Image (cartoon, rainbow, N blue to C red):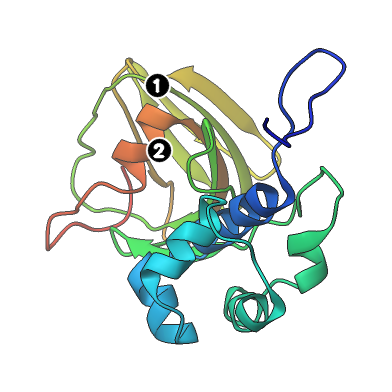
Amino acid sequence: MSDMAVTTSGAPVPSRGALIGARLKAARLDRELTLAALAAATGISASTISRLESGKRQPNLELLIPLSATLEVTIDELVSDAAVPDPRVRPRLSKRWGAEVEMLSREGSAMQTVRMVLHRRDEEPELRSHEGFEWLYVLDGRLRLRLGEHDIVLKPGEAAEFATRVPHWLGSADDRPVEIIGIFSRDGERIHVRAQTEPDRRAGR
């Protein structure tokens, strides 16, 4: 007979080991570490970590201490019975098109939030379209938004939202960088944030 508990609705409740394993995996993915990279950093084999994450191996302090230290989480965060996970997001900073791109949401979220700093481009904007949706908010500077037939300049405190199937482009409206917060649907995030760039491509989209 299984010793797994059930809720009043009859749904199974994950074991303590499975809950800890899920938290370990979430922390590893949040830091963009592979099993091999985490194994190298902790001295724990990748197969052992995989079994911990899947709940097939019971965790102990000998394993949790190096894992928690490397993943920068406390043991209490891993073993607590609280159902609410740590809500903090650790931003990931990179550069695309010569611009700063800081991811502000968790990997795999349905909507991705980014902070971007874009610069002026001298060449004529190349409008692009794709599936998805975008919401933009200007923090500093002046943002030039080309959207279909519209050519708009947004100032700090102003926002815009649009379906990305309409051809569009973003960049600085003058010689100063422009800092924005953007929220993209997954399709928009894949194209705007993760797409490989041409070697001589400058900031702006």
Which one is nearer the viewer's eye here, 80 or 111? 80
Q: In the rendered image, is residue 18 in sight? A: yes
The reply to whether dot 1 and dot 2 touch (C-beta < 8 Å) is yes
Residue at 33 percent across and 15 percent down: it is 166
* Residue 83, picture quadrant: top right
How far from the left and from the top, in percent, is residue 110? 52, 30
Q: How crowded is the residue under tag 2: few (<14 C-alpha within 10 Å), some, or many (20+)?
A: many
Disc tally is 2
Residue identified by numbered label 2: 189
- Amino acid identity at mark 1: Gly
How far from the left and from the top, in percent, is residue 29? 49, 57
Tag of residue 37: none
Residue at 43 percent across and 46 percent down: it is 173
**Quarter of the N terminus within the rendering:** top right
Tag of residue 132: 1
How far from the left and from the top, in percent, is residue 77? 78, 63
Residue at 68 percent across and 56 percent down: it is 20
Q: Is residue 1 left or right of residue 80?
A: left
The local secondary structure at tag 2 comes to helix
- Mark 1 → mark 2, Cα distance in angstroms: 8 Å
Q: Is residue 148 left or right of residue 175?
A: left
Q: Is residue 115 left or right of residue 175?
A: right
Q: Is residue 152 above or below residue 82?
A: above
Q: Is residue 158 above or below residue 87?
A: above
Which one is nearer the viewer's eye here, 2 or 44? 2
**Quarter of the C terminus within the rendering:** top left
Residue at 70 percent across and 71 percent down: it is 73
* Residue 158, picture quadrant: top right
The local secondary structure at tag 1 comes to loop
Which one is earlier in the sequence, the residue at label 1 or at label 2? 1
